[in-house]
Image: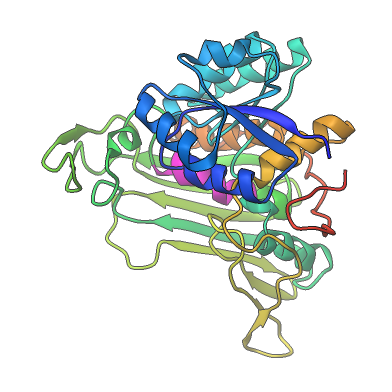
């Protein structure tokens, strides 16, 4: 079985689950090297997961001829520069969300990839898991009739009470929409299709945040981005709904996601996870019924999108977590601020076609094509 060799740029908190899954399940991907400004992080990961190489700089990884895909796990405001440099070096890129911090940066990356004949894939890949894939089948098969609306919300008081270094969540490239919005919007467009317009209000309720987690407890962070965003989204299929994301609210449950149709309502589980409970309400039953998960990948299988990309590049089939999807989601997210600034509807012109649904694997972690 031929494998695709990849190198990681950034070995932070999220890298552990990627490395665990890529070394344990997704054998069609081989991690050959790691790079992080804090070399000790790379060394610990190298020892734990048996990775052959540590690169001194990301440019050393880009120069490694056996590497086909650069995995960009840097902080959000660094995504653009790292992905751009990797593309310029002739490498495909799989990036953590979001694609970039602005629409203009995203446009540059898409144009550069097209110019060089390269591909960009990226997170979130939770939409490939059992929950969202099952929800998609239920909708496509008519269980809620014709979709007419939706509501989605990610509500919390921010990350400064638990994250060891949370300042970047309040800096350029951060905020609740760019942080958590990709999960909700990626799931939404996979379930219902392209967004055509956004009308939104965005604000920051608090000009400063105080870190209460260790080791930076007491540090004051200046808020540079909106932390409370409410938007109305219009979809190409005629459905209209709302998306609300905030770091400013005291709230017990963090996630809510519902899709409404002419014949029923679907309770979509938290799109930050791969396999959680789905509920369907139909007029015949008049109560919510738990629906079975019909697809694989129910646990935390981050790296699933990268594995799909690696096989897609070899078999020359479309990538599911592809660059069109990444850019469309970025376009929609950044439209919230554009709409809020001009106090008017923002039209979404970026194209989007839903990728093919997942196929059931004969062996978990192995793509047949």
Looking at the image, how many numbered discs can be counted on the residues? 0
User: Is residue 24 among what the camera can see?
Assistant: yes
Residue span colored magenta: 176-187
**In which quadrant of the rendered image does the C terminus lie?**
top right
Q: Of residues 97 and 229, which is closer to you in this image?
A: 97
Instruction: Please give left or right for residue 48 compared with residue 143 in the image.
Output: left
| In this view, 117 is above or below 225 | above
Q: Position of residue 100 (x, y in %)?
A: 52, 26
Q: Residue at x 75, y 75 (%)?
A: 263
Residue 279 counted in the magenta span: no
Q: Residue at x 47, y 46 (%)?
A: 180
Residue situated furthest bottom in the rendering: 285
Residue 182 counted in the magenta span: yes
Q: Of residues 117 and 144, which is closer to you in this image?
A: 117
Q: Position of residue 94 (x, y in %)?
A: 63, 30
| In this view, 364 is above or below 290 | above
User: Which secondary structure dominates the residues rendered in magenta?
Assistant: helix
How is the rendered protein coloured?
A: rainbow
Instruction: Please give left or right for residue 140 compared with residue 150 in the image.
Output: right
Q: Residue at x 60, y 48 (%)?
A: 21
Q: Of residues 112 and 71, which is closer to you in this image?
A: 71
Q: Position of residue 177 (x, y in %)?
A: 45, 42
Instruction: Please give left or right for residue 79 compared with residue 325 in the image.
Output: left
User: Is residue 125 among what the camera can see?
Assistant: no
Q: Position of residue 236 (x, y in %)?
A: 74, 45
């Amino acid at each position: 079985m031929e494998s695709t060799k990849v190198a990681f740029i950034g070995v932070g908190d999220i890298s552990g689950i990627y490395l665990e899954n890529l070394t344990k399940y997704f054998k069609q991907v081989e991690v050959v090297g790691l790079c992080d400004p804090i070399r000790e992080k790379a060394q610990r990961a190298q020892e734990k997961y048996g990775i052959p190489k540590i690169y001194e700089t990301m440019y050393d990884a880009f120069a490694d001829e056996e590497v086909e895909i650069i995995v960009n796990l840097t902080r959000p405001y660094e995504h653009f520069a790292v992905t751009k440099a990797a593309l310029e070096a002739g490498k495909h890129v799989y990036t953590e969300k979001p694609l970039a911090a602005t629409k203009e940066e995203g446009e540059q990356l898409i144009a550069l990839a097209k110019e060089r004949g390269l591909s960009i894939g990226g997170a979130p890949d939770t939409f490939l898991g059992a929950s969202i894939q099952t929800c998609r089948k239920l909708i496509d098969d008519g269980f809620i009739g014709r979709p007419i609306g939706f509501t989605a919300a990610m509500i919390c008081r921010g990350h400064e009470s638990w994250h060891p270094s949370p300042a970047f969540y309040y800096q350029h490239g951060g905020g609740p929409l760019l942080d958590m919005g990709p999960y909700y919007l990626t799931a939404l467009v996979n379930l219902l299709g392209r967004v055509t317009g956004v009308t939104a209000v965005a604000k920051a309720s608090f000009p400063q945040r105080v870190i209460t987690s260790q080791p930076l407890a007491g540090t004051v962070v200046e808020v540079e981005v909106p932390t409370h965003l409410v938007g109305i989204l219009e979809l190409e299929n005629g459905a209209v709904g709302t998306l609300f994301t905030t770091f400013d609210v005291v709230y017990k449950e963090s996630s809510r996601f519902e899709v409404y149709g002419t014949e029923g309502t679907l309770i979509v589980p938290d799109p930050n996870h791969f396999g959680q409970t789905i509920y369907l309400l139909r007029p015949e039953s008049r109560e919510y019924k738990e629906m079975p998960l019909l697809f694989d990948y129910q646990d935390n299988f981050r790296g699933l999108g990268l594995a799909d990309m690696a096989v897609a590049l070899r078999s020359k089939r479309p990538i599911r977590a592809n660059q069109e999807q990444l850019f469309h989601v970025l376009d929609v997210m950044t439209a919230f601020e554009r709409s809020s600034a001009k106090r008017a509807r923002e039209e979404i012109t970026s194209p989007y076609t839903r990728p093919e649904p997942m196929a059931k694997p004969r062996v978990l972690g192995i793509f047949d094509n």
